[in-house]
Image (spheres, rainbow, N blue to C red):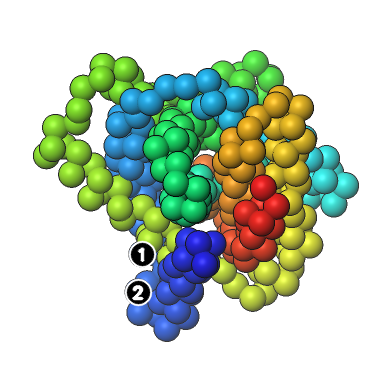
């Protein structure tokens, strides 16, 4: 029930976008403009608000973060390897690889973790200790979100400017990273959290309200971009990327967590984060950086469906 409560709303919001486009209730340009709004305004407000409120510390967060970062690089390696085997076109390779590693941490992973910890607290009577793990789960997001975005920018722009010298391409990618609104907002929120000050009520409520537009608008944009012909044409590639995300990633996390000696709860937290479906933000970034939007949308759709059994297995087995 926890999994369905977290994933079914994502599916329904995506379907709403599909219906709006199919019925021509809004013009196609509407979704492209809302993607810009989400990328430049909605997501930065949301990420700053989340990271600015982090106050917890702990070695458990470092251990879980290490597992997640290793999981990211495992997915990157598998993504490029499988993309080469499947002969994914160079312009689509960035979207293929991004879909294979970038999970929906804030909107799926964190709610599933919090619901799970709440249930465990009621069953074991150790609610205080599990509440600390809830803080740790939030703390892990602060450094991981900038890592996800930096890697996404590099991956999505790696195929550009093939005629330029590699140093020039590297410098251009670095500038994009530094100028990316998502990275800036996470760094800004993290620096603010170090002051241990509380966000002013007016500012906090404003950021929270603006950030709340992010998920529905992003998911409706994904749904509006889906086409039956597009899914048929790229089903194999989309499925391959999706399986890396929801199957290979948590398996790698389980192996690394065992090697590092994480506790059962820490292992569960890491595996839930790694098994989350590809983030809706992936579509927004693909659209803004000129990557393959259709492939990205298809990967997101498949991972949302496949994440349900993947997360169910994790919750039952850990």
Residue matched to label 1: 30
Residue located at (46% from left, 32% from top): 136
Residue located at (74% from left, 32% from top): 258
Numbered disc 2: secondary structure: loop
Numbered disc 1: secondary structure: helix
Which numbered circle lies on residue 26? Answer: 2
Residue 50 occupies quadrant: top left
Q: Where is residue 266 in the image (x, y as percent from the top left)?
A: 59, 35
Crowd around label 1: few <14 · some 14–19 · many ≥20 (10 Å): few
Residue 315 versus residue 7 in the image, above or below:
above
Report whether 317 appears left or right of 132.
right
How far apart, in angstroms, are the residues tagged by discs 1 and 2?
A: 7 Å
Residue 254 occupies quadrant: top right
Residue located at (29% from left, 37% from top): 49
Q: Position of residue 3 (x, y in %)?
A: 54, 62
Which numbered circle lies on residue 162? Answer: none
Q: Do tag 1 and tag 2 residues touch (Cβ < 8 Å)?
A: yes
Residue 232 occupies quadrant: bottom right
Residue that lies at the very extreme toward the bottom in this rendered image: 23
Q: Position of residue 234 (x, y in %)?
A: 73, 63
Residue that lies at the very extreme toward the right in this rendered image: 85
Residue that lies at the very extreme toward the front in this rendered image: 125
How many circles with numbers are drawn on the protein? 2
Report whether 205 appears left or right of 41.
left
Of residue 313 and residue 128, the one placed in the foreground of this image is: 128
Residue 220 versus residue 141 in the image, above or below:
below
Of residue 12 and residue 221, the one placed in the foreground of this image is: 12
The answer, for residue 294, to whether it is visible in the render is no
Report whether 227 appears left or right of 97.
left
Residue located at (74% from left, 60% from top): 239
Q: Where is residue 79 in the image (x, y as percent from the top left)?
A: 75, 42
């Amino acid at each position: 029930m926890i999994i369905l409560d977290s994933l079914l709303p994502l599916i329904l919001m995506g379907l709403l976008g599909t219906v709006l486009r199919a019925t021509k209730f809004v013009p196609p340009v509407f979704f492209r403009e809302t993607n810009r709004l989400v990328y430049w305004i909605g997501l930065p407000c949301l990420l700053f608000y989340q990271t600015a409120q982090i106050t917890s510390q702990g070695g458990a967060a470092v251990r879980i973060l290490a597992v997640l970062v290793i999981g990211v690089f495992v997915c990157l390696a598998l993504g490029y390897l499988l993309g080469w085997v499947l002969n994914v076109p160079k312009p689509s390779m960035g979207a293929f690889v991004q879909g294979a590693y970038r999970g929906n941490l804030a909107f799926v992973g964190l709610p599933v973790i919090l619901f799970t910890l709440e249930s465990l607290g009621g069953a074991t009577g150790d609610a205080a200790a599990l509440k600390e793990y809830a803080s740790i789960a939030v703390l892990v997001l602060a450094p991981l979100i900038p890592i996800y975005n930096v890697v996404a920018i590099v991956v999505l722009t790696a195929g550009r400017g093939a005629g330029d010298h590699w140093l020039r391409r590297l410098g251009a990618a670095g500038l994009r990273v530094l100028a990316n609104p998502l990275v800036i907002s996470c760094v800004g929120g993290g620096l603010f959290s170090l002051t241990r000050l509380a966000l002013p009520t007016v500012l906090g409520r404003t950021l929270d309200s603006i950030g709340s537009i992010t998920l529905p608008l992003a998911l409706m944009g994904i749904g509006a971009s889906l086409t039956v012909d597009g899914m048929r044409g790229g089903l194999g590639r989309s499925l391959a990327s999706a399986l890396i995300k929801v199957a290979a990633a948590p398996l790698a996390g389980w192996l690394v967590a065992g090697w590092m000696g994480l506790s059962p709860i820490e292992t569960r937290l890491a595996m839930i984060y790694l098994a989350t479906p590809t983030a809706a933000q992936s579509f927004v970034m693909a659209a803004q950086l000129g990557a393959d939007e259709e492939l990205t949308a298809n990967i997101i759709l498949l991972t949302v469906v496949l994440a349900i059994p993947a997360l169910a297995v994790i919750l039952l087995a850990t």
